[in-house]
Amino acid sequence: MIDQLKERLRLAVVWITEIAQVKTETLPEGVTARHKHSFWKGCLKGEYSVARKKWWFFCPVWHTGQALKALCLAQPFLNSEKVTLAGRLCADFLLANTVEEGADAGLLLAYEDDADQVNTSAILEALDGWLYFFRLTGERKYLSAAVKAADWVARKAYLKGEGLFLDCYDPARKEFIPSRFGVKGRPLLDDAIFLKMYSLTGEKLYRQIFLETAERLLQDEDPVGNWVDYPPASRPRGSIHPRHAYWWGRPFLSAYRETGKEKYLACAQRSAGWYQKAMRADGGLFRNTYLDFNTASFGHATSGVACAVILWLETDLAVNQPCFAPQVEKAVGYLLRMQFLTPSDPNLTGCILEKVMPPDGTDASPYHIRDLGTIFFVQALAKLLAASSHKPDWYPFLTRGKT
């Protein structure tokens, strides 16, 4: 099984680096974009409709940052110069879309929902890629860029003492605009970035921001292990985003390691438990999971399954026992079944099916590809392979045959 996982990892990385990654400074022919980026080389084409054979983007910056992280995690198992070169393209795409001078120096132009508005969460979700690439190459310019971007968020977006961040910034007007979701701000703990920045710089403000945000999340937790009152979850609909508990629950493991406080570990365990309840009988997950753990019949989110594997694995490591071994096995089996191995469409080879769309009255393919499915698939498999080397007995399915 280990050899199978390594081969599936390789195929997914080839899709990221040779099919999804843009290799030209301008947009390739036939790829549409609404975001105001002028330099595209190195970013990932995020969305692909199998029915229409069309590519487009959702949020090029944070998707590319997470792709960079995935490539760095995979590199020890692939040992490929091509992977490092592709990672450099990702890292340099982020550099090319960073403000270098003036009052907004350090701002990473992470356009997401709007073509010309920067999302704070999208900035934070991109930064781990730079940190991983710095550790891989030792090139300090990437570390410096990550620190400057985080510092911009700390200075401009954070509401001191509240554990909340303003979320939508207009670079042209140089001001934040009111949230379309009607919230004052969001408690963004994504990838424990501010705790990492404290570790790298010694700046105590970053640690304070991280722990204030963690406390806000503990205060506002609802339902157990999740946060329905903050977008992209929705209290009125009663629906929760598939990566919500990953972005906000997983960093509590870092809070526990930093402070030794059991309440932080307990929160991470509750988020891991939320995924356990949200996972379907075959190992899948849906884009919208409701408060009663019901779902629609379509709109799957395979990226959420991969994020659950990462959270389960890291929670097991934190308590030093394989509490979630059955869930990891079921989820990995599902992930492997979602990988295209011999498709007729060459754009699909090696990638992960993210979503099945509802019927539209035709016989067109309902398959929808998001780069995130493959990105988090790579991250999950790489972390599982790394853990298996020093915890070989934790997940027995790894020593059996193919799943």
Image (cartoon, grey):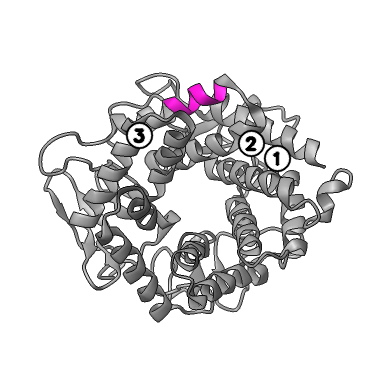
Label 1 secondary element: loop
Secondary structure of residue under mark 3:
helix
Residue 247 left/right relative to 204: right
Q: Earlier in the sequence, mark 3 or mark 1?
A: 3
User: The disc labelled 2 sits on which kind of residue?
Assistant: Cys
Say whether residue 83 is magenta.
yes
Read off the magenta span.
82-88
| Residue 290 makes an appearance in the image | no
Q: Is residue 205 shown left or right of residue 295?
A: left
Predominant secondary structure, magenta span:
helix
Name the spot of residue 132 as percent of width and height, x first. 46, 39
Does residue 304 appear left or right of residue 69 in this picture? right
| Mark number displayed over residue 339 | 1
**N-terminal-most mark, 2 or 3:** 3
Q: Residue at x 76, y 29 (%)?
A: 342
Rendering quarter of residue 81: top right
The residue singled out by tag 2 in the image is 351
Lower sequence index among marks 2 and 1: 1
Queried whether the magenta region covers residue 182, the answer comes back as: no
Residue 142, numbered label? 3
Give the percent coordinates (x, y) of residue 382. Answer: 64, 42
As displayed, is residue 184 above or below residue 199? below
Query: What amino acid type should be assigned to the residue bearing mark 3?
Result: Tyr
Query: Marks 1 and 2: in contact by CB < 8 Å?
Result: yes
| Image quarter of the N terminus | top right
